[in-house]
């Protein structure tokens, strides 16, 4: 049992409220996974200023150790910003902070993680004051791997690509070996990272996110509700049995998904939203 909350804002007038809306949603799913949490934010001007890329790191002892890199500390996460492509910036960050773990990179994406109660993570990263146009949050009840910040969701293994997962993949070990044979390198033994790296590999072959999610449904066994985001897309998919909870709500101003309705109840205009439960193995996508 884990908790998921995701929100894409179509209306720019709501962008200043992204953090406060996400904090309220995260709070309502805390009980589903109280051991650790993570948040992904797209377009926050402090974490990812326009025109710059960002790399999110865990385990940086001294963010000021490299004066050539601009850094922002948010809880346990250090976000490195720079005017280079994300992959090049990641190489520089790894050289500057060799002890750190990379947990995300992109032109607009910052990933922030931590152990302990999710509400405390929200305080530590000042979530309520963050801005942007899209966010994901995950509260974790660990079943497949250790309780550490690095094992927390979201998993981001390609530019601006992010995945959160409620459930478990039964055949993740087999797929992990196949991805390693293709050249993938893993950072954890978490089954959700296998899903993220599978999507990254299929998208690197030229498939779009919707096609890649259909391939995931054909390949992975188990129970899952996934929310996956890119620089322009918000996507939701469930397995063939769809026993993991998921509620979608859509208005002209936003689309949101959560594990429980109460996480959506405080969103502006919820009274006029189209609210429904996603069908099994149907891929739902929205573009900003």
Image (spheres, rainbow, N blue to C red):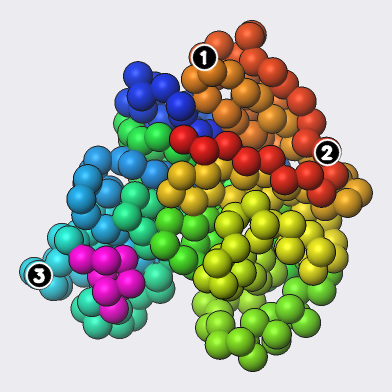
- Residue 150 position within the rendered picture, expressed as x and y whole percent measured from the top left: 50, 67
Which callout, 3 or 2, points at the residue further toward the start of the chain?
3
- Residue 106 position within the rendered picture, expressed as x and y whole percent measured from the top left: 36, 59
Tell me which residue sits at (37%, 62%) in the image. Answer: 105
Which callout, 3 or 1, points at the residue further toward the start of the chain?
3
Dot 2: within a 10 Å radius of its alpha carbon, few (fewer than 14), some, or many (20 or more) residues? some
Under tag 3, what secondary structure? Answer: loop
In front of the other: 151 or 244: 244
Tell me the number on the disc at residue 279.
Answer: 2
The Cα–Cα distance between marks 3 and 2, rounded to whole angstroms, is 49 Å
- Residue 197 position within the rendered picture, expressed as x and y whole percent measured from the top left: 59, 71
Query: Can you see residue 168?
Result: no
Query: In this image, 156 relative to 172: left or right?
Result: left
Quadrant in which residue 221 is drawn: bottom right
Tell me which residue sits at (24%, 82%) in the image. Answer: 95
254 up-or-down from 197: above or below: above
Outermost residue on the bottom side: it is 181
Residue at numbered disc 1: 268
246 up-or-down from 99: above or below: above
Classified by dominant secondary structure, the portion drawn in magenta counts as helix
Tell me which residue sits at (79%, 69%) in the image. Answer: 219
The Cα–Cα distance between marks 3 and 1, rounded to whole angstroms, is 42 Å
* Magenta-span inclusion, residue 258: no
Tell me which residue sits at (58%, 57%) in the image. Answer: 208
Write the start and end of the magenta stretch as one range. 84-91
Q: Tell us which disc is closer to us: 2 or 1.
A: 2
Under tag 1, what secondary structure? Answer: loop
Tell me the number on the disc at residue 226.
Answer: none
197 up-or-down from 125: above or below: below
Outermost residue on the left side: it is 67
Tell me the number on the disc at residue 68.
Answer: 3
């Amino acid at each position: 049992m884990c908790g998921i909350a995701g929100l894409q804002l179509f209306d720019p007038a709501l962008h200043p409220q992204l953090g406060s809306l996400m904090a309220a949603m995260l709070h309502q799913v805390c009980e589903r996974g109280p051991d650790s949490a993570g948040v992904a934010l797209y377009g926050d001007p402090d974490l990812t200023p326009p025109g710059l890329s960002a790399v999110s790191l865990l385990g940086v002892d001294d963010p000021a150790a490299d004066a050539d890199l601009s850094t922002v500390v948010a809880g346990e996460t250090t976000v490195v910003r720079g005017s280079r492509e994300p992959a090049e910036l990641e190489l520089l960050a790894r050289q500057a902070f060799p002890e750190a773990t990379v947990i995300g990179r992109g032109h607009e994406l910052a990933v922030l993680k931590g152990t302990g109660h999710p509400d405390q993570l929200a305080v530590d990263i000042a979530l309520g004051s963050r801005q942007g146009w899209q966010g994901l949050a995950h509260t974790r009840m660990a079943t497949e791997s250790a309780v550490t910040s690095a094992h927390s969701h979201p998993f981001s293994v390609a530019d601006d690509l992010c995945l959160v997962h409620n459930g478990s993949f039964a055949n993740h070990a087999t797929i992990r070996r196949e991805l390693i044979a293709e050249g993938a390198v893993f950072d954890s033994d978490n089954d959700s990272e296998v899903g993220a790296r599978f999507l990254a590999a299929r998208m690197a072959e030229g498939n779009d996110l919707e096609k890649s999610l259909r391939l995931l449904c054909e390949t992975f066994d188990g129970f899952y509700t996934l929310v996956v985001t890119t620089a322009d897309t918000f996507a939701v998919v469930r397995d063939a049995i769809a026993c993991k909870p998921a509620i979608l709500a859509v208005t002209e101003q936003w689309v949101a998904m959560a594990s429980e309705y109460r996480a959506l109840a405080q969103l502006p205009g919820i009274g006029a939203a189209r609210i429904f439960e996603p069908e099994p193995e149907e891929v739902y996508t929205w573009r900003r």
